[in-house]
Each structure stands twice: as C-alpha cells, then as structure tokens.
Image: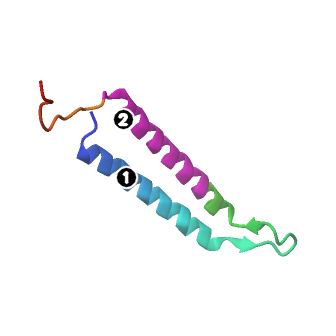
Amino acid sequence: MLDHDDIAHALFGIQQMTLVVMGATDHLGRSEVEPEYFNMPAADAEMICFAISDVLRRVEELKDNLRAKPPVVIRLCEPPS
C-alpha cells in the first residue's frame, strides 16, 4: 500500500525530472535556416528524453499502485435502520 512517504518520494522524483527538462530547454534556439524549428545541443536533447521517460515510468508506477489497492470506504455515521 502506498503511504505518504511513497507518494512524496515519487512526486519529488517527478519534480526533479521536470526541473531537468526546464534546464535543458534553456539552450533551445530558433533555427536560422528553418525558423519554425528549434535546435538544441545533443546532450540537452538526451537529458530531455531521459527525464521524460523517467517521469512516465514514475507516473505509471503510481497509477499501477493506486489501481492495485481496493478503495477505502469510511462511514462517518451509520445509515438509519
């Protein structure tokens, strides 16, 4: 079962990978030859691919873990008899 720490850890990892993507886009530049395209250093493109793959993996793991557990029903009061 996922507890608060499991979810917090997954969200922290997703946040870090999102920051990697944001950092890699700092070097994004408009192509002089084809202005509708952007260029970036290969290392930054590889970091984006890695980060997005990692985020997708983490989200899929969270969804699988949440789906595997039956929903919890909490009754605040008993229905009238």
Where residue 20 sits: x, y (%)? 51, 62
Q: What secondary structure predominates along the stretch shown in magenta?
A: helix
- Please tell me which residue is depicted at 64% across the width and 72% down the height of the picture: 27
Per the image, is 52 magenta? yes
- Please tell me which residue is depicted at 80% across the width and 72% down the height of the picture: 31
Lower position in the chain sequence, tag 2 or tag 1: 1
In the displayed structure, 61 sits above or below 33; it is above
Give the quarter of the figure containing the C terminus.
top left
Magenta residues (range): 47-70
The CA span between labels 2 and 1 is: 14 Å
Specify few, some or many for label 1: CA neighbours under 10 Å numbering under 14, 14-19, or 20 or more. some
- Residue pointed to by mark 1: 11
Give the quarter of the figure containing the N terminus.
top left
In the displayed structure, 44 sits above or below 4; it is below
Specify few, some or many for label 2: CA neighbours under 10 Å numbering under 14, 14-19, or 20 or more. few
In the displayed structure, 31 sits above or below 16; it is below
Confirm or deny contact between disc 2 and disc 1 (CB under 8 A): no
- Residue pointed to by mark 2: 66
Where residue 52 sits: x, y (%)? 55, 51
- Please tell me which residue is depicted at 42% across the width and 37% down the height of the picture: 63
Left/right placement of residue 45 relative to residue 73 reads: right
Look at label 2 and name its amino acid. Leu
Residue furthest front as drawn: 81
Please state the total of marks drawn on the protein image.
2
Label 2: which secondary element: helix
